[in-house]
């Protein structure tokens, strides 16, 4: 029998389900069982020993007809980026149960770039991305999960989680842990970069010891990821633009209750994605990656996004090269005034309309693919339907797209004898993008930091 039309409310937007019946991505899967994968380990006489292990954890016989949904929990007290994730994981578990699923929570590791930076520990940073991706893929495929909700905070949590999502290609959603709120000292906002800058100012004798200690102690006032458009917030914004996270979720503060509410909504949306058969590779396409990179350029995002999206595209088997970033950069203006090169932090971008506002402006300028599918089952254009064409009057975080901060994107792909295959540089404010001259090479982070401090001291 045909499925009766219904509607689901997601972030206050009515999402009609009826049009999904004719969606070529979704229609073939509407009759799939919600536990299509997990029944490999729960159904049949031969799986009695498997079920015994589930009974040990409190499962009932009726639970074996429900989907097994993983919650990849990046909670950790290693870094403030991840120290506030447990309440989100708890909300996800509760919402999955309420939606008729069996939540299966498992941990993922993290390290903090902000703590490891400038030491030999930083050499483990990129490695941690691969460990996170491998860990999530191992659990999802090893246990035949029917879907996965990934929760992460610090820099490498983001691409690591998305790489795993793309590899496994089971219904999935990314829940970003949320940004940190800004610190304050003498009337100005602080972020973690303020503390790094203070080291240079104090070393050069331009900052008092009193102010130095105050900035150190006030830069990170609570839990959440670094507050400017640094790597974590760049990747979360890009995931939202790509359609793998809910609208507005990428710029919420970790400590605000709306982050918990958004996580619960994400869990409900994931169950619908399992029911409809919406898979990551239906969403992660060349066109949706273009959308993500547009947003990265428009918001002044991190150089690390280049490295990470090359890896995500590879995991999703999408054709994407380093030259594609330069192609998009040349025709995409920077119109968000965000730290580290601008004035404002991510909580202020959220108040100005968040990533949906940025995307609506890009869509209006013909710089976004509005027909890309999202995890909600809506297209980008449908998702942005009720977003205003322009941000609220009086705010200065998001500039008019006609009068941007820079007419072209800030992440340039450079090639030369040091990088014949290409490298990336943030050229915000540079008048001459050509760099020639000698290069100094150091054998360790410690040697490089010592040389930097000597240079600062004259």
Image (cartoon, rainbow, N blue to C red):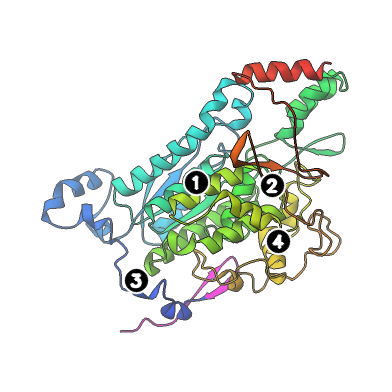
- Secondary structure of the residue carrying tag 4 is helix
308 in relation to 455, above or below = below
Proximity of marks 4 and 3: CB atoms separated by less than 8 Å = no
Percent position of residue 59, x then y: 27, 50
Q: Earlier in the sequence, mark 1 or mark 2?
A: 1
CA distance for labels 2 and 4: 21 Å
Q: Nearer the viewer, mark 3 or mark 2?
A: 2
Lateral position of residue 332 relative to residue 322, left or right: right
Q: Which mark is residue 311?
A: 1
Q: Earlier in the sequence, mark 3 or mark 1?
A: 3
Within 10 Å of the Cα at label 4, are there few (<14), some (14-19), or many (20+) other Cα atoms?
many
Q: Quadrant of residue 100?
A: bottom left
Q: Earlier in the sequence, mark 3 or mark 2?
A: 3
CA distance for labels 1 and 2: 18 Å
Percent position of residue 107, x then y: 42, 39
The residue located at (54%, 51%) in the rendering is 321
Question: Looking at the figure, which quarter contains the N terminus?
Answer: bottom left
| Residue 97 counted in the magenta span | no
Q: Nearer the viewer, mark 1 or mark 2?
A: 2
Q: Nearer the viewer, mark 3 or mark 1?
A: 1
**Which of these two is toward me, 78 or 112?**
112
Lateral position of residue 411 relative to residue 400, left or right: left
Can the viewer see residue 91 in this picture? Answer: no
**Which of these two is toward me, 158 or 44?**
158
Q: Earlier in the sequence, mark 4 or mark 3?
A: 3
């Amino acid at each position: 029998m045909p499925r009766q039309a219904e509607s689901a409310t997601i972030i206050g937007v009515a999402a009609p389900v009826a049009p999904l019946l004719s969606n070529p991505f979704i229609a073939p899967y509407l009759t799939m069982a919600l536990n299509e994968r997990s029944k490999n380990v729960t159904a049949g006489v031969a799986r009695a020993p498997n079920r015994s292990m589930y009974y040990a954890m409190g499962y009932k016989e009726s639970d074996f007809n429900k989907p097994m949904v993983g919650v990849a929990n990046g909670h950790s007290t290693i870094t403030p980026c991840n120290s506030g994730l447990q309440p989100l994981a708890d909300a996800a578990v509760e919402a999955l149960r309420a939606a008729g699923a069996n939540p299966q929570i498992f941990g993922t590791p993290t390290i903090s770039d902000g703590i490891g930076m400038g030491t030999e520990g930083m050499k483990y940073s990129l490695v941690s991305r691969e460990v996170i991706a491998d860990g999530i893929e191992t659990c999802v495929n090893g246990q035949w999960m029917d879907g996965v909700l990934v929760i992460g905070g610090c820099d490498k949590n983001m691409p690591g989680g998305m790489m795993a999502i793309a590899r496994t290609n089971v219904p999935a959603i990314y829940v970003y842990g949320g940004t940190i709120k800004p610190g304050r000292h003498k009337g100005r906002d602080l972020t973690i970069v303020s503390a790094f800058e203070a080291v240079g100012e104090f070393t050069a004798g331009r900052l008092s010891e009193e102010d130095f200690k105050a900035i150190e102690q006030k830069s990170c006032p609570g839990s959440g990821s670094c507050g400017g458009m640094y790597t974590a917030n760049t990747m979360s914004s890009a995931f939202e633009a790509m359609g793998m996270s809910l609208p507005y979720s990428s710029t919420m503060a970790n400590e605000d209750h709306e982050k918990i509410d958004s996580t619960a909504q994400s869990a409900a949306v994931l169950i619908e994605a399992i029911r409809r058969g919406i898979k990551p590779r239906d969403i992660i396409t060349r066109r949706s990656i273009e959308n993500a990179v547009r947003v990265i350029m428009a918001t002044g995002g991190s150089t690390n996004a280049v490295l990470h999206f090359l890896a995500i595209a590879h995991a999703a088997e999408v054709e994407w090269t380093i030259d594609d970033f330069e192609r998009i950069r040349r025709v995409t203006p920077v119109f968000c005034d965000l730290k580290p090169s601008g004035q404002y932090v991510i909580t202020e971008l959220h108040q100005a309309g968040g990533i949906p506002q940025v995307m609506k402006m890009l869509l209006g300028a013909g710089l976004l693919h509005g027909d890309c599918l999202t995890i909600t089952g809506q297209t980008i254009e449908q998702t942005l339907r009720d977003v205003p064409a322009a941000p609220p009057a009086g705010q200065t975080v998001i500039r008019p797209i006609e009068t941007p901060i820079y007419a072209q994107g800030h992440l340039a792909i450079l090639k030369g004898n040091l990088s014949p295959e290409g490298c990336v540089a943030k050229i915000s404010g540079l008048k001459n993008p050509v760099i020639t001259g000698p290069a100094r090479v150091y054998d360790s982070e410690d040697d490089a930091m010592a040389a930097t401090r000597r240079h600062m001291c004259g």
